[in-house]
Amino acid sequence: MSDATSTSDFPTSAKVVVIGAGIVGNCLVGHLARLGWTDMVLLDKGPLPNPGGSTGHASNFIFPVDHNKEMALLGVQSANQYRDVERSVDSGGIEVARTQERMDEFQRRMTSAAAWGVEAELLTPAGVKALVPFINEDAILGGFHCPTVSVVDSLDTGTLFRNEAIEKTGLRVFANTEVLDVETEDEPATGLRKVTAVVTDKGRIDAEYVVIACGVWSNRIANMAGATIPLVPAVHQMADVGPIDVLAETNNEIGYPIVRDMDTFCYERQSAGSMEVGSYAHRPILHHPDEIPSNEEAALSPTEMPFTPDDFDQQMEEAIELMDMLGDAEIKYAINGLLSLTPDAMPCLGETTEVRNLWSAAAVWVKEGPGMAQVVAEWMTHGYPRVIDAHGADIARFYSQERNDEHIWSRAEEHFNKTYGIVHPAEQWEHRRNLQVSPLFSRQEDLDAFFFQARTWERPQWYGSNADLAERYGVQEREVEWDNRWWSPITVGEHLNMRDNCGVVDLSAFQIFELSGPGAVEFADYLSVNKIGPVGRATYTPWLTPDGGFHSDLTMHRVAEDVVLVVTGVFDGGRDLHWVRKYMPKDGSVIVKDLTLDISTLGLWGPNAPALLATITDADLSQEGSPYGSLVNVDLDLPAGTVRGTLFRISYVGDTGWEIYVPWDDAPKLWDALMANGRDQFGLRPTGGGVYGTSGRIEKGYRLQGAELESEYNPLEAGLARPKVKSADFIGKEAYLAAREQGDPEVHMCTLTVEDQTDSQGRTRWMQGGNEPICDADGNVIFDSHGRVSRVTTAGYGPSVGKHILMAYLPTAHAEPGTDLQVMYMNELFPVKVVGTGAPFDPDDSRLKS
Amino acid sequence: MSAAVLVVIEHDRGALADASLEALAFGRSIAEQLGASVEALLIGAEAAGLADACVAHGAGAVHLCSNSDLSDYGPEAYGAVIAAAAGALSPAAIAACGTDRGNEVLAHAAAELDLPFVANCTDVRIGDDWEMTRVQWGGSLNEETRLTSSLPIVSVAHHAVEAEEVAPGASADVQPLDVTLPDWVTRSLVQDRVVLSEGLTLATAPVVVGGGRGVGSAEGFAVLEELAAKLGGVVGCSRAVTNNGWRPHSDQVGQTGTRIAPQLYIACGISGAIQHWVGAKAAKKILAVNTDPAANMVVKADYAVIGDLFDVLPAITNG
Amino acid sequence: MRVLVCVKRVPAPGAKINITEDGQAVDATNLGHTMSPHEECALELAVQLVEAHGGESHVLTLGEAAADEQCRWAASIGVNKATLVDVGTQGWDPQRTATALTHAVRSIEAADGAFDVIIFGNESADTGGFQVGIRVARALERPMVNAIKGVDIVDDGAVLEARRETDAGMEVFRLPMPCAIGVKEGITWPRYPTMRGRLASKKLVVEQQTSDAAQGGQTMVRLNRPEEKVSETVILGHGADAAPAVVELLKELGLWTEGAAS
């Protein structure tokens, strides 16, 4: 190791500079070394082995069960990496419930445990007490026990990974070295900047790659380069109380299972002879990175801020209620420990969207550190992570409105107390709404629309004004509140009305990027599996990762000789735009422009759609005049004047119709005309996202990026491979061809119908599409040879099929139509039948051809 | 010639405290600004023998108060003597060294006289007002302060100035100071002593070998003891060590422990927290032994050996 | 036995103490607050004396309203009563502080009875004036010795035997009670509050006082950070191999005697 006191051997250049020697930075250099990287420098402004960041005061335990796939699997992955270096003890852990609602949640946790292959059991209060003799069993209703909950040594593990990189590649490490600036240069052709150097108080290092693994300080360092890492340092209070004889007698760092007192948002974790009581129950306490003291200024460490006891009093009372012995133990150490929170409670991984080769490995906690570090190392090496699809953690997911302090703080404040909360898969944010609305927003409000927010965009999920449709079709509320939450029978009414008449869906949230210039088409082809069509055609296509998995699926519109529009969903717009910028030619032959706020899109579908559309245009709307996949530029004769629009014949809902593209400001004119002409004569209703995104889509088995489509799966498995592969090169082609060479894929994306929704209490239940595992007839969860679990990627009621429909990848042996399987939901098994890889509704697409 | 600066000489049953010589040097710096002389105040008959040393260090006159009540040290008694001397001698200022005793007796005198007292100065500047620099936060901060007083009473921070022999061999003219002390002053005289250690102490040893958290256990201090014995020094420790119960508090070097000023301080496995540093920084030279080259102690030391103290110390001890 | 303990709320900084722009105070933004280690020991001593001899302990502080936190801390480890002299956020000079505290002690004693012992910390952690306790004791005409590291109640409760550390051992004082002492860290091993203690302390009623004491003769102009010694550390070597270089250094400093007992 270098002497930090001498500056003579401070490097002037390196291939990679990793800033931050906490658990993430250390594991990152270790993983990069394993992947063959050399010429690396690791910096930290603090001393080693504990530079004073969050790693140094973490409670260091890992509960492997999470409903989110990325967090769960990377938690397991991380736990195993800690085990590999023998810095881990399986203490076991028990979540205890004080409420019936929590007991119900435990059923859901059992289900997720099954999905991720994690051993778990439910315990009675007596069962909990058998494992934790000092617990007050009268305070609890039961427990959720996970024997593989582990306690790790994150500092030591970090040191081992760092040393591995030193031994393997001669990594140079500089502690007590403060980063003063991160320098960049312009890259005019792409509009990005490129990182060039890191300036420290010990000298300047020219660098090809810079990784920010600075925990709570990450955004401050990113800002030096003009980039953003949207996270905020937030307080997690922790008090260490002891000594306590029963704990000391174990002669062990951890001898009893960790207890998570879920309904008080607290945990009790033995630490040798004392107990650490940690809380996520106090008011959210956020800090600006500039408020964090330096190592020198801090009384303890920078991220161990002064304890504010008033915020902890209630937790003390509840802790004593749960474990009486805690009341008489001395509070030896108590901190307002800092950790990182992001606007959506997911990490910030990947290349920053503003600066090429500036990477973020931030907002990662100890429990997922080694796994997340592996994700970033693989991403840097292979162009995409291999261990898991990480779209939920991809820093490119954030739009600019999600990157400012107001948003970060508000969202962090809102979700902090949900750390141990019971969060519904469809749960909506309360604050920071209406950040981005469609030009039809006020009209939709007038129609009593219930909005779901997709990142920044407000989209009607259903319209309260359509309540009569629910009545017309006799649709009931769902029996169990959880199943009914964030759902409305109106959706079913809107769906059936669309099938009977027609519906208009506001698609203004589509993210539209224009590629223009002499290289535009060639570049568009390079991004896409499927060949870009001639002018007047739109192509539905996957974008693959270099490894041949899904990065995205979207449509590419050839609107002029040298112009292609990329039209993608709002959840992936940020990732897709970054992908374009990352790969676009640097010779200036392609110009990319974001047209999202210039173009509005309305979807018009249903048997009456052609007749309704004919009331405002003379264009030939027949299958010949406007064939599937065509783009037809038309004049729309609206009462408010003639509007120029483009008709794209396509459907994501299974009925014939169009996506109609018009200038943003003209959308209200079109909407008004359709409503005026359509409501009485053609049965037109405004139709929400519940139909577009779920019920209409799932009846047709259409795939959705981020649900069915992830980088872990390829087009063959997803059933999206075409008979031939185009000759032109495209990202992921080699891997795609290799997969095709192997013949039939191991798994197939299938639709399934739930044959009986009745649970053991006689209630009708509705799977939510929250990774519920698919089991064979014997109740065994189905995994493939890669360990990928068969799980529900989307669930939704198919009103026209009359059944609850699920989508899941199934191994070939289970994918045969008619196969009887089971789905686990709330820890119960329900019979399901495989429909096959096709659609349960109108499998021949006859309605699209009419 | 104007009134003198009266310096209170600290001693223990006639044994001069070195700190007093610093007080005399400090007194001279004040006196020079005032164009005055320095006079020493000896309290207790046993102190009579210290007069020559006072003169050698610049005292122009020596006053000895040998009141029979002053059988031993007592803060209230000494404070009363100083207060009485203020009346009897009308000095321009009263000074002492900022030791436990020095600060204590000046505070008692100031309380008696109802005058301000400024403790632990490092510098005094006399213009229209008295302005001084004094230490706060155990020396981590300096305070610039202004004093308004008919009789400035100040102590000098220990180790802030160097003692200097300015008139070697000069002999003193000792003037008796007769004061009447109230009866109650004897209530706080030293009544007894418990001798815990003979010989070297943390405060006086030429070499201190200090151990911190890096020593790891009470037993680990054996290698420090061996080196200290070899060098004729003593062992000290950091607050972390005391808190862990590895050494008694009396071994603690630091802001709230003992402040040391040896020829050499060998700091072993000590990170260099401020608490410790302010107690150690008066050492003439500091040698840090630490595995972490970035440790604060290493950065602040004059010399360092990077390595495990359990390797390094025995190697030194064995020459 | 009635015991009063006086504490001062101070920021809890790290190694580097920041000063506000106007130089009038320590910049305590994002710092916690505490009291000096001497005072923590003083609190513990007060509680122990009452535990051993019965009676009541009382904490007195002068400072800003937020010093309520230090009163509750005292209560959380067992101190029975609390009085806060609220003088706002401006620091008071030692004479003024002593006058206000003296007045407060008299008022508490008038209500609840005289204190047998008043315990101060040897000096405050921040300003370190080394005099407030002595001035208060003098004004109350009670014996007072500073730097105490051991006490016993002797002579049937009439005398407080106080010991203080010297280079050679301990000096013993026998102070007739009522008396006052200033104590140093090490006199006790301060306990931490228990959770129940903390919760109980919330019920403490902190008596609020104000003071019109006159300013003393010492006025702080401003705070500065002393210049740090900037010196390149000479690395003598790594591990045991460095021993010869260290021995050379010791010889240079005249601290190495060849053949000395080893």
Image: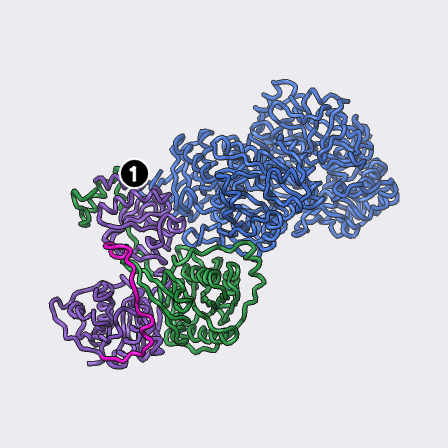
Chain colours: A blue, B purple, C green
Dot 1: few (<14), some (14–19), or many (≥20) neighbours within 10 Å? some
Report the front residue among A799 and C176: C176
Residue C260 placement (x, y as % from top left):
18, 44
Residue situated furthest front in the rendering: C156
Report whether B116 appears left or right of A458: left
Residue B284 placement (x, y as % from top left):
24, 54
Give the mark count.
1
Q: Is residue C13 depicted above or below A810 in this figure? A: below
Parent chain of label 1:
B
Residue B199 colored in magenta in the image: yes
Q: Quadrant of the N terminus of chain A?
A: top left
The amino acid pointed to by label 1 is Asp
Q: Secondary structure at mark 1?
A: helix
Dividing the picture into quarters, in which one does residue A454 lie? top right
Report the front residue among B81 and B140: B81
Residue B7 placement (x, y as % from top left):
24, 72
Residue A465 placement (x, y as % from top left):
82, 48
Report the front residue among A761 and A111: A761
Report whether A547 appears left or right of C114: right
Q: Is residue A487 depicted above or below A700 in this figure? A: below
What residue is disc 1 on?
B311
Residue A849 colored in magenta in the image: no
Start and end of the magenta stretch? Answer: B178-204
